[in-house]
Amino acid sequence: MVEVFVDREQELALLDRAWDSRKAELVVVYGRRRVGKTALLRRFARDKPGAYWVATISSASTLLRSFTQAVQGDDVGYAYDDWRAAFMAGAGSSSSRRLLIIDEYPYLAGAVPGVGTILQAVWDEALQDSRLMLVLCGSHIGMMEREVVSYKAPLFGRRTGQIRLGPLPPWGVSAMLPSWSSASVIETVAILGGVPAYLRMLDPERTVVENVERLALDPNGVLHQEPLFLLREELHEPRNYFALLQSIAAGNTRLNEIAQGAGLESPAASRYRATLVELGVVEREVPVTEAHPEKSRKGVYRIADSFLRFWFRFVAPSMSLLDLGQTDAVRRRVEAGLPGFVSQAFETLCRQWVARADLPFSLTGVGRWWSRTAEIDVVALGDEADLLGECKWSTRPVGVDVIEALRARADAFRAETGRPPDRPVHYALFSRSGFTPVVLARAADPTAPERLILVTAEDVLGV
């Protein structure tokens, strides 16, 4: 695959604004591995005076020598006396603009106890009055938050900018896969998410499932044990967390169900779940109409990361088969379960489309809605109107029966949320495979009984 750099305009703009300020800046960039932090920073650092240093798992003395070489040049024959002197030297002259990027900062913090406090003292005493732009970057999310971001961190209150870099949006994935169909791109988003490093591993001459088999199902595949590496880096005792994630991936969404599926007592499961939510691995969802979502008892849980969700759904339960070389059997399971798996991801993409769409009313919230009697895939709440949507990941065009079913659920929505019967409602249909002629005609008919918006897979991807 051709190396490309897509999206990331907002992040580059934030870094550019910090650089252009001409005053001392301390910017924190963090996010999961392979999400593109280093590519972003190297793109930003081009043609800027300064140093880019990557910490490694090594001793404190080796790191100090390596930092010295990054600042002074590879042929330097000495190391700074200590980290205070190193940080001062990295800042350069107080009269000139300089960029210093410390990548994989958690490795430095792990090897040099108290380095955050040292950096804080140097910043307060000298660097805050310099023209240095310091960027601290790391993949260990928990440690970055403890050491740099949280109010207990030594550097709390010093940072002037922060980027928690997430996966590429769906239109960014589409830009990286320009020759792929919209359906294939959406399947890829559902399985791999928008992680640039994963996307660069794809072979455009193979199908999505063939790529998944090669990368994730094959015991020798690059991504076969990727989630184990990701989670072991963040979690000290990963076994119970793995059980919890596998329980969620199996379809358990409420705390008691998740605990039972994982074979854990509820109090312990709650602690593990809270940690996973804090790390952004698991997310909690409530009906979009809940006035106080943090207090709602209707909350359900899902794995937030696409590849973790796929891996715990299909790979983890089949490890014994895969180790025995039964890759074909597991691939058939993936092929059978993939439409249902992708349909859930498609719903999420449709909600993202609504959030950025030019609707005829101002939005106050976008999400999903459900009750004991009905469920609606996409609900956009507005000041003066609402939008209700149905998503269909099917190989058949959406027919008029879907409209009638959505209208029936809309009646339940109004009744259970107390919406006035005369409140305007817009209806949206999202389809992988287009719409029947009757639906197309009805959407174009100004006298039709509903305001109808039709959205294709291409629309959802923004292409």
Image (tube, rainbow, N blue to C red):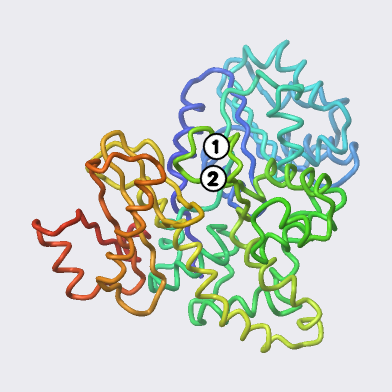
Displayed quadrant of residue 70 = top right
Q: Earlier in the sequence, mark 1 or mark 2?
A: 2
Q: Is residue 266 above or below residue 144?
A: below
The front one of 19 and 374 is: 374
Q: Which mark is residue 293?
A: 1
In the picture, the quarter occupied by the C terminus is bottom left
Q: Is residue 386 above or below residue 223?
A: above
Q: Is residue 279 left or right of residue 243?
A: left
Displayed quadrant of residue 260 = bottom right
Instruction: Classify 10 Å Cα crowding around label 1: few (below 14), some (14-19), many (20 and above).
Output: some
Residue at 31% across, 62% down: 429
Instruction: Please state the horizontal and vertical placement of residue 1, each as a whole percent of the image.
Output: 51, 70
Q: Is residue 214 left or right of residue 4?
A: right
Residue at 49% across, 76% down: 204
Instruction: Please state the horizontal and vertical placement of residue 60, each as a whole percent of the image.
Output: 89, 37
In the picture of the structure, the residue carrying the numbered disc 2 is 286
Residue at 60% across, 29% down: 27
Q: Is residue 200 above or below residue 50?
A: below
C-beta proximity under 8 Å, tags 1 and 2 = yes
The front one of 12 and 75 is: 12
